[in-house]
Each structure stands twice: as C-alpha cells, then as structure tokens.
Image (spheres, coloured by chain):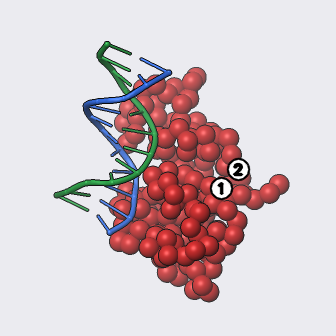
Chain colours: A red, B green, C blue
DNA sequence: GCCAACGTTGGC
DNA sequence: GCCAACGTTGGC
C-alpha cells in the first residue's frame, strides 16, 4: 500500500515534539482534534505506516521540527466524552463517536527547525496546505514536499 | 497583544 | 438555507 504524508500541528507550550519523544515507546494518541475536515482525515484517510511532519504552531519560530509515523488507524477519540479532559464534547459518545484520532510515534528529530518563513519562501512548497489554509491542524502533504522538508530539516537542504 | 482568516452557531 | 455574530487559530 502506498505511503501517504501528512502534517500535524501542535502548540509546543501545550504538547511538543519532545513531549512525544518522552512518551512510552515515543507513541501517543493524537487526541483533541475538533475540526470536521481534520476529523475526516483521521477517521478515513490516515493509515498505519503513513508519515507525518510534526509542526510547532504559535512558537518562535513556528515550523516543522521532526517526523512521526502513524502506528494505529483512526478510532474514536475517547477524550470527547470524558468531562475531565481538556476538550470534552457532550455530543460525542461511545455509541456515537463524533471525533477520531490516530496514534503516532516519533521518528526523525530535525537538526534544525524548518520555519514557516522558510517554507513560504521556498517555491517548491508554495502549494502546501500550510501556506494556503493555515488553520487546518491535520493536513495532507505531497511526497516531494515531505521529502524536501525532511532534507531541509536534516541539514541537506 | 493584535487582528485577519476561517469555521461554527443560531435567529429568522 | 442564508448570513450575521461570534469564537478560535495562529502568524506577526
């Protein structure tokens, strides 16, 4: 099956790439996504083995800091029906889940941040969803965009 | 901290 | 079903 590529955003003050690396097996549930477009990707499109660019938003500077691999296909986000969680949604239940998540495992740590400023200044990356619809927190990435950002982050670009 | 862009809600 | 009001995201 063809590997696909995604970008996931997190505010590092909330949950950083280092936080992911500190998890058991460097693996975490990607919970808390409360946007329907992103939900549909998590539920239907994002599969085990797909690769992810981990992006820090609302940071100095905002940018890509590493990669991760999807290790569990979409399943209901149980934090939605947990009133104690950070993002409860009473419309969602075990019987009728509204929100979904996948599990991701940290992979490569970039040697340097590939900043949003740099991404915007790179012609080959000008079609990225990140540039065009900056608010979507889970978004598709083309394979050549993924490979270019990794090479920039690993110091070869 | 500001505010533009975008998504969601709810009155009609 | 329209659209104004409101809330959120996230760069700057």
Q: Quadrant of the N terminus of chain A?
A: bottom right
Position of A44 compared to A38: left or right?
right
Q: Tag on residue A70?
A: 1
Query: Which secondary structure lies at badge 1?
Result: strand
Taking the spot 70% from the left edge, 65% from the top edge, the residue there is A143
- Check disc 1: other Cα within 10 Å, few if <14, some if 14-19, many if 20+: many
Any mark on residue A47, and which? 2
Q: CA distance from mark 2 to mark 1?
A: 6 Å
Residue A127 falls in image quadrant: bottom right
Q: Is residue A102 above or below residue A80?
A: below
**Can you give x and y, in whole percent of width and height, for residue A93 in the image?**
51, 26
Q: Is residue A51 above or below residue A149?
A: above
Q: Which quadrant, please, contains the C terminus of chain A?
A: bottom right
Identity of the residue drawn at 42% across and 31% down: A89
Label 2: which secondary element: loop
Mark 2, chain letter?
Answer: A
Residue plotted at (63% across, 60% down)? A141
Q: Residue furthest right?
A: A1
Residue A25, visible in the rendered structure:
no
Q: Please state the chain letter of the residue tagged with numbered disc 1 in the rendered image.
A: A
* Residue A146 on image: x %, y %: 64, 68
Say if residue A136 shows up in the picture.
Answer: yes
Which residue appears at 62% of the width and 45% of the height? A41
- Graded by Cα atoms within 10 Å as few (under 14), some (14 to 19) or many (20 or more), the crowding at tag 2 reads many
Drawn side of residue A80 relative to residue A45, left or right = left
Out of A104 and A65, give the one closest to the viewer.
A65
Look at the numbered discs 2 and 1 and tell me whether their residues touch, using CB distance below 8 Å: yes
Residue A13 shown left or right of residue A122 in the figure = left
The spot of residue A108 in percent (x, y) is 60, 73
């Amino acid at each position: 099956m063809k590997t696909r590529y995604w970008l996931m955003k997190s505010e590092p003050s909330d949950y950083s790439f280092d936080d992911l690396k500190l998890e058991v097996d460097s693996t975490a549930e990607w919970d808390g996504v409360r946007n329907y477009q992103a939900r549909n990707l998590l539920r239907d499109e994002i599969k085990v083995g797909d690769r992810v660019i981990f992006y820090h938003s609302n940071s100095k500077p905002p940018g890509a800091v590493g990669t991760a691999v999807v290790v569990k296909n979409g399943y209901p986000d149980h934090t939605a029906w947990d009133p104690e969680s950070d993002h409860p949604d009473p419309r969602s239940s075990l019987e009728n889940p509204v929100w979904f998540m996948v599990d991701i495992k940290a992979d490569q740590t970039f040697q340097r941040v590939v900043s949003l400023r740099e991404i915007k200044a790179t012609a080959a990356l000008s079609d990225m969803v990140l540039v065009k619809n900056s608010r979507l927190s889970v978004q598709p990435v083309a394979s050549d965009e993924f490979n270019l950002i990794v090479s920039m982050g690993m110091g070869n670009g």
